Image: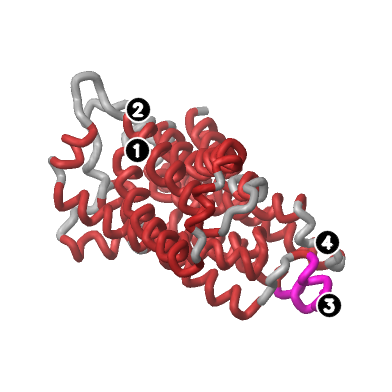
Amino acid sequence: MEIFIGLIIIAIGAFCQSSCYVPINKVKDWSWESFWLTQGVFAYVLFPLVGAFLAVPAGESLFALIGAHPQEAWLTLFFGMLWGVGGLTFGLSMRYLGVALGQSLALGTCAGLGVILPPFIKPLFGKALSESDHITVAVLVGVIVTLIGIAVIGIAGAMKSASLSEEEKREAVKDFNFPKGIAIALLAGFMSGCFAIGLSMGDSIRFDNSDPLYASLPATLVVTFGGFLVNAAYCLFQNQKNKTWGDYGKTSLYANNIFFCALAGLLWYSQFFGLSVGKGFLQESATLLAFSWCILMALNVTFSNVWGIILKEWKGCRQNVIVVLIVGLIILIASCFLPQLLREAGDVFLKVLV
């Protein structure tokens, strides 16, 4: 039952993340760089800070904890900055492919690399592997099935691109560009996978007596802060380049724009808050702990495509395109449970042999 609860919590966080771009559409008369920076303050700094404080036991200090692990903190921050680059290109992938296909390809790449890369990269920095870093056959099969599901969705996207006229493509996604979008989405996914590497690097940035539900949130704060530094620098550069400093002087828009930026930030951060809390319920399954990042990304892809359907990004597609899309979504959902089922089946098989 606890495993099921953990998966449900991760799913809720994934649904919130996939919904975070909806409030952004309510931001009025601000340039992209202005609202992206504002929502980043909430998504990458304020809400992660609140979450990290939940992990602080009475009489302890969050900043003292981070300062006590300087090497881990700097490495975690560094990979957070690399993830920040992925966050910037992530938005471009949706600009050219739409919410559904853009998130699918970027998060798919992120899902696989986020599970596979940490065990190879940590030893390069002299870091020992934790239990959740070890890749078993069950975890590897789960990653492969997840990538198959995302590939099927990518095929649906390619079929959509081939079946629609240029006018219909522009109606669904204003700046639709399939080749450019694919390239950017793959880059975004590769860099975004650095978030998982950052969390792995910072696995010692936790209190020994912290509630397991919140234990990884201090490391999450360090990663997101690294991403914020990159995003803030780029947005401020764009403010200067595009002469959009005046956006911040439109005080009459503050109530509306800050509210929706804060809501978008809260929804975005919910995925990692849900991941931490969900992992607290998965402690009895080392397989699902190792696979949890892939579960989150798979569910993000699933719900982003649900939003894509709601936002009519698949409007006008032939029935066979929708069928392929649904098959891909079913494979993704199944992949979330597959590693644990394989692990349990393996245990039963071993018992029979013995």
Q: Residue at x 45, y 54 (%)?
A: 138
* Viewer-proximal residue among 173 and 250: 250
Question: Circles 1 and 2: CB distance less than 8 Å?
Answer: yes
Q: In this figure, which residue is indicated by the disc labeled 1?
A: 217
In front here: 6 or 125?
Answer: 125
Q: Residue at x 33, y 49 (%)?
A: 225
How far is disc 2 from disc 4 in space, using C-alphas?
43 Å
Mark 2 lies on residue = 54
Residue 163 at x, y percent in the picture: 82, 76
| Amino acid type assigned to the residue bearing label 4 in the image | Lys
Report which quarter residue 181 is drawn in. bottom right
Farthest-out residue, top: 58
Question: Which quarter shows the C terminus?
Answer: top left
The reply, left or right, for residue 310 in relation to residue 84 is: right
Nearer to the camera, 42 or 329: 42
| Residue 136 can be seen in this image | no
Magenta-drawn segment:
158-171
Mark 3 is on which residue type?
Answer: Ser
Q: Which residue is mark 4?
A: 315
Please give the residue where the numbered disc 3 appears in the rendered image. Answer: 165
- Taking the image as shown, residue 23 lies to the left or right of residue 348, namely right
**Distance from label 1 to label 3 (Cα)?**
46 Å
Tell me the element at label 2: helix
Question: How far apart, in angstroms, are the residues tagged by discs 4 and 3?
Answer: 12 Å
